[in-house]
Image (cartoon, coloured by chain):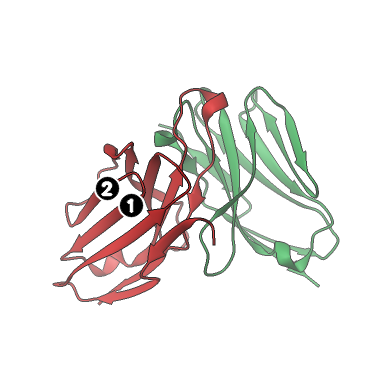
Chain colours: A green, B red
Amino acid sequence: GENVEQHPSTLSVQEGDSAVIKCTYSDSASNYFPWYKQELGKGPQLIIDIRSNVGEKKDQRIAVTLNKTAKHFSLHITETQPEDSAVYFCAASQNNNNDMRFGAGTRLTVKP
Amino acid sequence: ETGVTQTPRHLVMGMTNKKSLKCEQHLGHNAMYWYKQSAKKPLELMFVYNFKEQTENNSVPSRFSPECPNSSHLFLHLHTLQPEDSALYLCASSKEGQGASNLYGYTFGSGTRLTVV
């Protein structure tokens, strides 16, 4: 089955700096890659996703890149703000939602 | 609010108790999921329901029993749990589809923090 690894497990940046979180996956058939943000006391919330026919996707300060050959994908947050502090999860899936597999999460802290 | 509501938010139960967790969504989604979230571990998929039919049971012990009476409601019945079952239990829903273009992300509830004593 699919195995998703996520790095780093913790990340601390200064406000205004960029943050990058990386994930690798094992199954070359995976073709859908969402990212979730989990704030304290809440469930994970989908913030951006990318499909295998696209190499990069942006939404304001966040962007995701996908390298299918290397089987890795990354989340980029620019101009970080304290409210970006949360745990971020990557995930990978094939043709249906039954096989969605999540990374272990990255705790991002943005220092003011 | 995300559109997926879980109750209760917190639950403390003894190992001999029987309790149930409830999840409700009115987003028009046709797939619902139970996940277990433990500290420093990836989210663990427990059960999947598509159009009210269970399509995945990820080797979950029988002390956890899911029920999906309709596509908007999902329950997790708990019986004779162990302390290691203490965790955050998350419910999620999504549109179910085949093929990458029909895949969508999940909408999660806020979870039930379960403590087994």
Amino acid type of the residue that numbered disc 1 sits on in the rendered structure: His
Name the image quarter holding residue A70: top right
The Cα–Cα distance between marks 1 and 2, rounded to whole angstroms, is 6 Å
Please tell me which residue lies in front, B37 or A72. Answer: B37
Please tell me which residue lies in front, B43 or B32. Answer: B32
Residue appearing at x 46%, y 24% in the figure: B98
Q: Position of residue A16 (x, y in %)?
A: 86, 61
**In the drawing, what numbered circle is on residue B92?**
none
Q: Position of residue B46 (x, y in %)?
A: 32, 48
Name the image quarter holding residue B5: bottom left
Name the image quarter holding residue B19: bottom left
Left or right: where B110 falls relative to A33: left
Residue appearing at x 57%, y 25% in the figure: B101
Badges 1 and 2, same chain: yes
Residue receiving disc 2 = B68
* Quarter in which the C terminus of chain B is drawn: bottom left
Residue appearing at x 44%, y 42% in the figure: B29
Secondary structure under tag 1 reads: strand
| Chain letter for mark 2 | B
* Quarter in which the N terminus of chain B is drawn: bottom right
Q: How many marks?
A: 2
Q: Position of residue B11 (x, y in %)?
A: 32, 74
Q: Is residue A41 above or below residue B90?
A: below
Question: Are the two marked residues, 1 and 2, in contact with CB atoms closer than 8 angstroms?
Answer: yes
Amino acid type of the residue that numbered disc 2 sits on in the rendered structure: Cys
Residue receiving disc 1 = B73
Q: Is residue B98 above or below residue B96?
A: above
Q: Is residue B13 above or below residue A75?
A: below
